[in-house]
Every structure is written in structure tokens, then in C-alpha cells.
Image (tube, grey):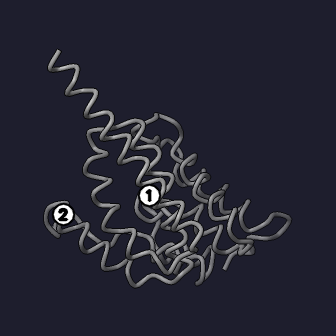
Amino acid sequence: MLEATAGKSLTVFALGFAIAAHRGQTRKYTGEAYVVHCSNVGRIVAEHTNDQEMIAAALLHDVLEDTNLTGEELRGIFGDRVTDLVLEVTDVSHPRDGNREKRKALDREHLARSSPEGATIKLADTIDNTESIAIHDPNFARVYLGEMDKVLPLLRHGDARLWDRAERTLQMAQEKLIHHELAGSRAVSQ
């Protein structure tokens, strides 16, 4: 394992690594640098733990899904625990596994086997994604929020305060979506 803490904390190193790994990637809903999402997830996790490896994994949670980096490469740089946590929250499905519903069912099965730390990272990811998608893409929000309704019960073993926050965030997003749809239907009928 590369000595990530020489003069820098593990989390600072992980953030720098995430910035480099996600360079040029943007969030489709906001256009901001993708690493802003990674940073948000890391910050949310850091609000609930001082576990530096867990926070580092939160910062790196999408690096295996969204870049060419392999698990073996990540393990060589960050070691077993950080990599194992990232793997716990990385989708396991592939396009060849079928339609979105089938793929998401495979990913849920994988998440259900996560550790409490992995579930906590996924809760933070869910909170940040739900807030962003509900605001910026009401059309996709219908699909995403339905999927999160199925995911949340599988993450009860994560941090209880974050689970409650994720549930409230999901409920608020669902209410916002209903309000948006009602406003749209009123506008059409006028």
C-alpha cells in the first residue's frame, strides 16, 4: 500500500485522488465537477464518524464505477479496508444483465450484504443523489425515487441518524415530485 499519510491525512489524499480520477467528469444534472458529489458524500459521512478509512472510501465511492481504475489498483494504493468498503457500494450489475429493473435488483442484493460502514456510505450517497436529482431532473426522479424506496430498507444496518436523514430526504423529494406533477397537470388543464 502506498504511504498515503506522509504529510497528508488519508482523507486529503483520497480527495486529491478522487479529483484526479474523476477529472473532466461532470454531474449530468448540474454540470458541476463530479468530484463535488464525492466530496459531499465524504462530508456527510464525516459528520457521523472520525473513521478516516471510512471517510476515504466515501470520497472514493464512485471511482470503480465511473473510471477505468480497477479494484486491484485501488487496493494497491489505499489498502484492503478502503477498497473493500468501496467495493461494497459499487454496483455489480452490467448492461448484459438485463433491463434497469433487473440490474438494480442485482445491485440491491449486493448492497444488502454490506457492512454497517458500507451501508452508511451508501446512505450518504443516497442523500446527496436524492437531493440533486429531485431538484434538477423531475422526470428521472420518478424512477430514481422508486428505486430508493427499495434500497433504503436494505440499509437499516448503517448509521441510524443517517438512515433517518435519508428517509426524510426521500420523503421530501417524493413530496416535491408530487407537487411538481400537480403543478404541471394544473398548467395543462388551464
Image coords of residue 89 (percent x, y): 45, 71
In the picture of the structure, the residue carrying the numbered disc 2 is 101
Amino acid found under the numbered disc labelled 2: Glu
Q: Residue at 19%, 27% (x, y): give it.
A: 185
Q: Which residue is mark 1?
A: 67
Viewer-proximal residue among 1 and 120: 120
Residue 36 % position (x, y): 58, 46
Using the image, determine if residue 140 lies above or below residue 40: above
Specify the farthest residue to the top: 190
What element does badge 2 sit on?
helix
Q: Is residue 71 above or below residue 127?
A: below
Secondary element under disc 1, as helix, strand or loop, is loop
- For this rendering, which residue is in front, 101 or 134? 134
Q: Residue at x 75, y 75 (%)?
A: 3
137 displayed left or right of 165: left
Amino acid on which the number 1 mark rests in the picture: Thr
Image quarter of the N terminus: bottom right
Q: Nearer the viewer, residue 117 or 142?
A: 142
Mark positioned earlier in the residue sequence (1 or 2): 1
Q: Quadrant of residue 189?
A: top left
Q: Position of residue 15 (x, y in %)?
A: 66, 57
Q: Is residue 160 above or below residue 190?
A: below
Q: Position of residue 55 (x, y in %)?
A: 65, 67
Q: Nearer the viewer, mark 1 or mark 2?
A: 2
Between marks 1 and 2, how big is the CA–CA gap? 23 Å
